[in-house]
Image (cartoon, rainbow, N blue to C red):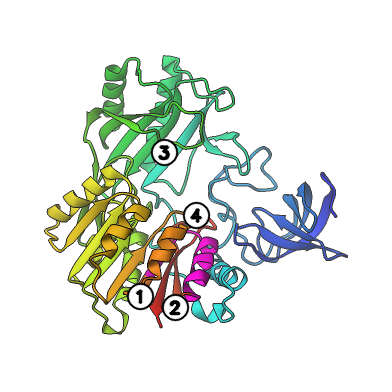
Amino acid sequence: MALMGETLTVKIESLAPAGDGIARVEGSGRVVFVPHSAPGDRAEVEVFETKSNFARARLKTLLSAGPERVAPACPHHAAPSRPGPACGGCDWQHLDYAAQLKHKRAIAADCLRRIGHFENAAALVGETIASPKPWGYRNKVQIPFGPGPRMGFFSAGSREIVDLRECPIQPDVSVRLALWIKAAAVRRGWSFYDDKTNRGWLRHLFVRVNAEGQALAALVTSRPEFPDRETFAAELRAAHPELIGLHQNVQPEKTSVVLGPRWRRLWGARDIEETIGRFQFTASPGAFLQVNTPAAALLYDAAKAALGEGGRRFPVVLDLYCGVGTLTLWLADAFPRVVGVEENREATSDAWRNAERNGVKNVRFKSGRAEAALPILAKELPPETAAVVDPPRVGLSQPVRRFLTDRRLRRLVYVSCDPATFARDAGFLCKSGYVLRRVSPVDLFPQTSHVELVALLDRT
């Protein structure tokens, strides 16, 4: 067993689903997980966590670099030559992009084999579909503020904020807005939130940017008052003509959940318009929209192709966890009727507006939790129905999994942002009458270990 603070010499063999390098200590079989390492790296590492059968260690000295290692583009990324805490946002900037795609496919296959118990996992998983933009792709960012004053992203495994200077995965306008707002907040003497004491007013900055470079911003505060808001809004608009709307969100709770229930428009547009493929979508500030717009189109194409594979044309398709209706509308020209289900009422309202705006008439949306909506929808399902699910990271709840075993559901396309929970759910579904045909990884989050999956399951 490794000791806390012990220095070990290791060689990185592969990458774990969480993104860390997997190493074995030279001279023994002890397993060590090393964040920000690359396969083939030989390094000295310092143990910071020990368990009965493994340890976690930080990279201390890189003795020799593996063939897939590259210099990180961001000055906040972890590197042995850079002292101090590193940003926890992008854990794979040190990997060549082609290697990132390869390892994301391997992670999906590994989860299917270990968690889902699919013996043919490697054959089921296809090549990872690359993002059209590996950099500057994020259309949304949530940046915490903290004492110091600091504004940036949390260091990996902690609540310590690494003060932001630049961020190459964000559009330039998002970074400029963030730096300006921080400086303006300091000038005005606004108190920055301290999550240890639950004191301070300014908690987060929320920015959403569309393909045209327009921005919608929101300040997340602990209390509803907003000192000097009219002057602040006027100065912000003058400095950033790309800004089309300014909002306030109030989150009074002592919680890591960023957004609270109360929104207030301070100036300008209520929501922002985004173009994905041939569709125009409207999204209110808190509504879900995929953060990588060009890659989202590839994801939706993969889901649509899977639903229609073999020329199948189902009379009804259910789109569960549909958000603002992006995928629902994407499917509408291929199937007679598509029904979207979404918990967020604002997102459901956006979805109806998006359908009307794009002239799509064969869709409808139901607001509510999937667990509550599905028993009602089940009463009207025809014998041949298909479903698409895009659940949060925790995967499908037991009631939704049970609903999907209904024999009238003949095909299921599962869109997942977590290979582990997908593998768990796929294992359950395949014991309940489905066959997993294939899994397509899609890279919506370049420079990170996160991978999105599109899987096709058919009823036997």
Q: Which mark is first along the chain, 3 or 4?
A: 3
Q: Check contact, mark 1 vs mark 2: CB within 8 A.
A: yes
Task: Give the vertical position of 150 relative to 343 (above or below).
Answer: above
Displayed quadrant of residue 213: top left
Residue occupied by mark 1:
407
Q: Check contact, mark 3 vs mark 1: CB within 8 A.
A: no
Task: Residue 451: say if magenta.
Answer: no
Task: Give the vertical position of 61 relative to 217 (above or below).
Answer: below
Residue occupied by mark 4:
394
- Magenta-drawn segment: 413-431
Badge 2 element:
loop
**Which three-letter amino acid code belongs to the residue tagged 4?**
Val
**Which three-letter amino acid code belongs to the residue tagged 2?**
Gly
**Which three-letter amino acid code belongs to the residue tagged 1?**
Arg
Q: Check contact, mark 2 vs mark 4: CB within 8 A.
A: no
Task: Give the vertical position of 369 relative to 294 (above or below).
Answer: above
- Left/right placement of residue 394 relative to residue 58 reads left
Q: Which mark is first along the chain, 1 or 3?
A: 3
- Left/right placement of residue 135 relative to residue 25 reads left
Residue occupied by mark 2:
433
Residue 175, numbered circle: 3
- Left/right placement of residue 35 relative to residue 89 reads right
Real-space Cα distance between discs 1 and 2? 9 Å
